[in-house]
Image: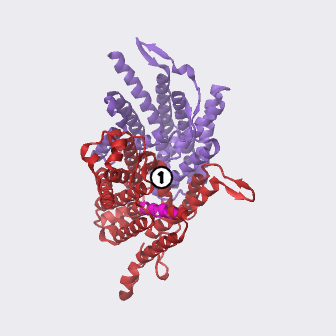
Amino acid sequence: MIERVLQTLVDVVSVGGLYALTALGIGLIFGVMRLINFAHAQLIMMAGYAILVLFSQSVPLAIAAAAVVAILLALGTERVVFRPLRDADPATLLIASFALSFFIEKTMIMLVGSRPKGVDFLPELARQIEVAGVRLQLLQIVTIAVSGALLIATTWFLRSTKLGLEMRAAAENFRMAQVLGVRANRVIAVAFAMSGILAAAVACLFVAQTGLVQPRMGLQLVVIAFVGSVIGGLGSLPGAALGGFLVGAATILLQTLLPAELRVFREVFLFVAVALVLLLRPQGLIPAPGLKARV
Amino acid sequence: MMAVPKGRDEGRVARLAPLLMLVAVVLLVAGAAELAPAVVQRRITQGLINLVAVVGLYVFVGNSGVLSFGNVAFMGIGAYVSALLTMAPAAKGVFLPDLPPFLAAAELPVAAGAFAGGAAAALVGAVAGFPLMRLSGISASIATFAILVVSYVVLGNWTSVTGGQNSLMGLPIYVGIWTATVWAVVAIVIAFFHQESRSGLLLRASREDEVAAAASGVNVVWNRFLAFVISAFLSGIAGVLLAHFLGTVRVETFYLDLTFLIIAMLVIGGTGSLTGAVSGALVITALTELLRQIEVGVPIGTTVIAAPAGLGDAVLALLMLAIILFRPKGISGGRELAWARGPKELKLSQPAADGHNS
């Protein structure tokens, strides 16, 4: 019994961590640009393909390539699509990222086909280990460790470095930060690069977990993470991470607790719960300061 | 915004001008289809069904400025409800042996099935819209994605009622060019009178400046809600038409790809006006058909040159991006058709759009 509870707990925390990383990557961009980036899914997907190409040669190389590809794609899309739209309203940015996301996905389908490809990435992580008499999957422990480390690193960056301070200032009031000498292009580029790194990390963990790469991957993660960041409070980074974690954790809890015939409907229960939370707190659990329109 | 001429006598007719001209365009397209070969006629019928879907999306998105990803879910609901109510009981016995008795025995006339499909979609829209419309614009957009996912999961797994992942076949096929035309005209009329109504105008005011509208006493939540329900109804009807045009329904039809297509049509046409919705639907239907031909292969001399599969989707996404970047108000420029170009609208000095606090 205790073992079952512990296993579920580890499961919940590891999946929650994965969604928290995804939501944080999305939240960083939303913070500085008010952009909900659908194309975050394609950052994850392209990083996945980088792993597919290189994993058989060297694992560190594959991880590095995933990071480089995701960062370059993030910076490239910022430069080509989002920079010209910097003064557009959030609804336009949302549509633009939706179109961009589809464009990258459909182009990949055109180039490599839509069939999933198997990747035997980090097979050694699939084995079970015994911690204090409880059997756990090593990959889940690694997922929790990586998620925790990246969340802490991001927090440290935002709190303790000059760039992080500028970024938080820009998230609070972009115009004012610019007037006070924060360089917009640099802050936004750094935010995109960081979201690229987070996407690459998610890609590594996700590919190791599922063993598959395909052009449509990432979208489901990103949509659930979106909903998580809405629950957490759009525009608030702790809110995004918390909301992402809660939604991911809830998915696994529902999977475990629901009777078998209702399990296929778990998204329904999840989103009904989300609707209830939003009825009580339309601004999210941790409302962002400065997001409310000022006149 | 609507160009409302000042002259009192010409005012009333001129106000109706966009409606009359859009209806005329639809009738012209239908008339041309009547003379065209059967294959082309089918494509045009499909285009008019798309038009109903895009106009349905426009009623909410165009007037409120809040993007909705949920309308294809309403299409799915409309399609399945109408299918279940109008299929022959014998066919239902084959595909859906576990159907509740009252559904298994039902065989309504197709028109009643269509209205039931639209009404069911509107009802779901009302239930979902109640919590969602209270959210701020951008959060509401994301939350509408939840409607899409939920409907996809329910329709795809509620096997005893929807057949789950299997297609439902044997629907009465009654949607031809004229049925589609009638519904296209009805959709345009509903959308036009909604946007000209008090509620529609208040909603458009909130689209231009939510804070100022709310400060002037506009109940933004209520007016959004109303538009969302009307929008859900029209989307439901579009789903009904699609189902009874194809004769089959499949849950996969009502998911991301159709969502993208309908949104792309509205954005490329121009979200700000009914003219944009109609022109987007017609132009993009023609374009996607052309691209599909290229994917199948174009004979040049004796060789057939075919583009790689998936080209059409990629081009459509690229076109949508280009429109957002270079002509953000779409083909229509956010304006309605008018008899004659009135004096250019006064260019109000735009408040610096900073996307953050304005």
Residue B132 position (above or below residue B272): above
- The x and y percentages for residue A15 are 43, 30
Q: Residue at x 49, y 20 (%)?
A: A138
Residue A223 sits in quarter: top left
Q: Tell me, yes or no, whether the highlighted magenta stretch contains residue B47.
A: yes
Q: Which chain is purple?
A: A
Up-down: is B200 above or below A121? below
Residues in magenta?
Answer: B43-53
Q: Is residue A84 left or right of residue A280?
A: right
The kind of residue tagged 1 is: Leu
Query: Chain B appears what colour?
Result: red
**Residue B3 image point, x, y percent:** 43, 77
Q: Nearer the viewer, residue B54 or A292?
A: B54
Give percent across and percent down for residue A140.
Answer: 47, 24
The residue that mark 1 highlights is: B258
Q: Quadrant of the N terminus of chain B?
A: bottom left
- At horizontal 45% and vertical 13% (from top left) the residue drawn is A130
Q: Looking at the magenta stretch, what is its main secondary structure?
A: helix
